[in-house]
Image (tube, coloured by chain):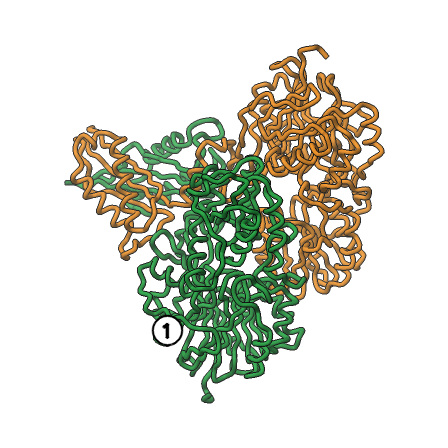
Chain colours: A green, B orange
Amino acid sequence: MSKKDRLIYLPLGGAGEIGMNAYVYGYGPEGRERLILVDMGVTFPDMDTSPGVDLIMADLSWLAARADRLEAIFITHAHEDHVGAVGHLWPRLKAPIYARKFTAAIARLKLEDHGVSTDALNIVAARPQVVDAGPFKVQFVPVSHSIPESSALVIDTPAGRIVHSGDFKLDGNPVVGEPFNPQEWHDIARERPIHAMMCDSTNIFSHHPGRSESVLAEPLRDLVANSKGMVVATTFASNVARLKTLADAGEAAGRSVCMLGRAMKKMLTAAVETGVLTDFPPIVSPEQAAQIGRDNLMLIVTGSQGERRAASAQLSRGRYLGLALKEGDTFLFSSKTIPGNERGVIRIMNAFSEMGVDVIDDHNGLYHVSGHANRPDLEAVHDLMKPTMLIPMHGEHRHLREHVKLALAKGIAAEVATNGTMVDLTGTRPEVVEYIETGRIYLDGAVLIGAMDGVVRDRIRMALNGHVLATIIVDEDDVPLGDAWVEIMGLPALGRNGTSLADTLEADLAEFLDRVDAKTVKNDDKMDEAIRRLIRQVSVEEIGRKPEVTVVISRLMAD
Amino acid sequence: MSKKDRLIYLPLGGAGEIGMNAYVYGYGPEGRERLILVDMGVTFPDMDTSPGVDLIMADLSWLAARADRLEAIFITHAHEDHVGAVGHLWPRLKAPIYARKFTAAIARLKLEDHGVSTDALNIVAARPQVVDAGPFKVQFVPVSHSIPESSALVIDTPAGRIVHSGDFKLDGNPVVGEPFNPQEWHDIARERPIHAMMCDSTNIFSHHPGRSESVLAEPLRDLVANSKGMVVATTFASNVARLKTLADAGEAAGRSVCMLGRAMKKMLTAAVETGVLTDFPPIVSPEQAAQIGRDNLMLIVTGSQGERRAASAQLSRGRYLGLALKEGDTFLFSSKTIPGNERGVIRIMNAFSEMGVDVIDDHNGLYHVSGHANRPDLEAVHDLMKPTMLIPMHGEHRHLREHVKLALAKGIAAEVATNGTMVDLTGTRPEVVEYIETGRIYLDGAVLIGAMDGVVRDRIRMALNGHVLATIIVDEDDVPLGDAWVEIMGLPALGRNGTSLADTLEADLAEFLDRVDAKTVKNDDKMDEAIRRLIRQVSVEEIGRKPEVTVVISRLMAD
């Protein structure tokens, strides 16, 4: 370690939010550090802040501008918020990607979906295999989570050993995949002291110890065994352990099991092909399922978050792939509702209620456990690893802050570092050295746009205010032709006195064009401004709101 | 009771949703029943389903068309979802309004806000006062809830006694306002058997007995006493008892109390003026508060649901009325987050976290209790009243259905009746006799529009798909002028190959205009259709989405 080298940490996504994880580590002389990236995730849009957007990902421009210094990309696990952006953003980085087998299988599908070569993708075994990436030596250490093969990273650097926790919980019996192994972590910390730990903060506000995935087997078996009619269960498609527990419960009750939803099939196939999942009960196709009596059938379906196009929502609207729920059937949410998704989930619950279907959700924790370490579990991990410093990640600001308070109370140096905060980890305490401009990139249809480009802002404005279009024609002599055309969209047809808004606007515009002075007519900007102001003013009078206005001035040219 | 008379119940709002309550009762010969209306509430819009809308209320057209048969309107309590539409919709009904003193004070403000005469408003005392309304004799019976003076209605009809529960909980010590009095209800049921009960269903899924408002006094006092810096608490403005408990806690800790937010002041004033609230601690103005040391100050503010314009959101964005939070202050949500409001609330929590403010919410029920009867409480009320039949109200479909199941299990005849379901209550079991077309009315700026008018649908489409405007000019000889103008709004400026979307569209349109046949040019509909199709097709190629398209064809006329 040369005197001038430094070890830096820079979250570009995932710190100050739950979603779109992207964490950079660097080592070397200032401004010339060799870099690695951990995770390339997405987050999901919503109508309030990102209507019409397909996916949201971290703006990796800072990293793309330094791609020549990027040694490698590591993917900790196959959740969308960790791997979802790999197809979209890898072409801007072009560094080797390392992941374990199952995760790599999902990453491969994502690269292929975008027609990106998969040559950069490398499958790595768990520790003790070591990936050399410039000054970094990286090992994947299995941890338990809500997807198979989730891994923490042990990152050895000349400035010390880093543990990047990834997403984890303390589960000794996760049904599918490896348990959390305290002995291994004990060994890792004894082998070389943990200089810094970047740690999952999702459940910092959950004060009870977390529960094992395996505790669900019995309640789920009982529920399915005691249900009449068709049983339909939904959960996160990537929770392969849960899929197995649910399918086992169905099989134990003598029911044929049918899986609905593309994401679920993709995950199951990858899990079976990579060998992480064995002895899954036989499944039947939707066509076969349609021929089976409903008392002998169990469906496991996508859409636990109320997504409009997923199987659960389709079933809530009626027949889907030949299958339909009816009075006396049971629909189980073996999941929790992520904050912000409540409306969609409740809509589905009520639709099923209207069909006479009994909807069961997870009010008492009987049918779902979280995939993240709760507060006492996090404390246990702090105690096990004894890091010199701790930087919380994978959390909103309130989670990060609370996690820092917890660490400080234990005498661990800690710092809140949100997206764009570059932290120097070289010494014995984290030191904020720079703020990098970061942000969000939207996948919008087929193109990537910046969150601040104004595109989505304009959509929100049209949604809130409606849109008025005014078309004016000015003739060869700079005289406006008498009539103006007005079209309205997303606005009441009639104003408060019952007269047509469009007609009123056209009449007032015609009057304006009649008396407008020649100088204004010649100036597009002035015309635009005057017409816009007129339309907004008349609209306020007529309908009590100021719409968005687009003015098109067409000027006829002399032949 | 003549042989042909019947007793009917018809919810027009509030049954199949939580919000915009409006329930009709009728008695008389079929089609000539004399009617009463209970409650005229609103519900609140959201970006997903009603962007730009100001308020949502029940479509009372059915009732308006029969206004000559409407004897009276009764308002059970002053929550927005029960009284909020009175200013907007009363002019369509024009029947006398009856309410108790505090409720009437709030209703009066709403009528005045809309310039509606308050002559129709009548203040009624609690039972034993009786309001005669045609065949109905109506008494207001105090119940406990989360607002003063909440009342159930005892409605005597020739066909039997009805209890309309209103919103209630079983609280023997509600801090402000009357307790729930089991003895009085026992007497009411003994006086005359309860033929039918329309019952609050909000908390049917809460399996533990409800808790009294009074249990919060001690935890809140402790919390405020043990906090350093400024303490800011938010709750529902109408929960006058909570305001008092919070203010008492502030006073006990030696803090001056300041209230922020228009709704809160309105409620407090009405409560004091009508005498329902006495001995509230002295309050200081924001100007005075700004001069008081933060350790000696407590703010009670509006905005517990994250509303963007309320005091809590203002404070989360910085200084508000001269007051600002900072590191070490405490912000308390003495409230629950209504499903659908999570994002707004979380946004505020994180903003305060960034300031270093400790945010405390109600995870453990220490600082908030619900205003509605839980399942065991509902059962206790069923047992107390022993109604012959029960129709659940004030709930989504899943709540109503669960409540019906509970009643049926107790041997009470029960039926799910959602908005528009007319139920004949004359016999010993509810009988659905008709479905009335109902819906929602939006207050949109200054005008009322129907939810199905397409206005909001167009807004949502523009938000999801963006908007392209194409302007074409056709000359006197039906020849399109070569250039087309295209404006885009809410769409990416550049297509997937980096070329301008608007330029590409204009070029392709120009080419189309060049080769279009004369017959098409003469036909507005055909032109519109062809241009729309072209724009959508090119947009899919360029940006991967189909925008909303507005085509304006201007035809020049020969002079």
- Crowdedness near tag 1: few (<14), some (14–19) or many (≥20) residues, C-alpha within 10 Å: some
**Looking at the image, is A203 positioned above or below residue B86?**
below
Q: Is residue A171 left or right of residue B97?
A: left
Q: Position of residue A239 (x, y in %)?
A: 51, 57
The picture places residue A284, in percent across and down from the top left corner, at 45, 47
Judging depth in this view, the residue of B508 and A540 nearest the camera is: B508
Q: Quadrant of residue B112?
A: top right
Question: Residue A43: x and y, percent?
Answer: 47, 57
Q: Amino acid at mark 1?
A: Arg
Of residues A399 and B97, the one drawn nearer to the viewer in this rendering = A399
Secondary structure beneath label 1: loop
Q: Quadrant of the C terminus of chain B?
A: top left
Is B311 positioned to the left or the right of A108 in the image?
A: right
The x and y percentages for residue B22 are 63, 30
The quarter of the picture where residue B153 lies is: top right
Q: Nearer the viewer, residue B233 or B393?
A: B393
Residue A311 visible in this rendered orientation of the protein: yes
Report the residue marked by disc 1: A66
Name the residue nearer the viewer: A64 or B264: A64
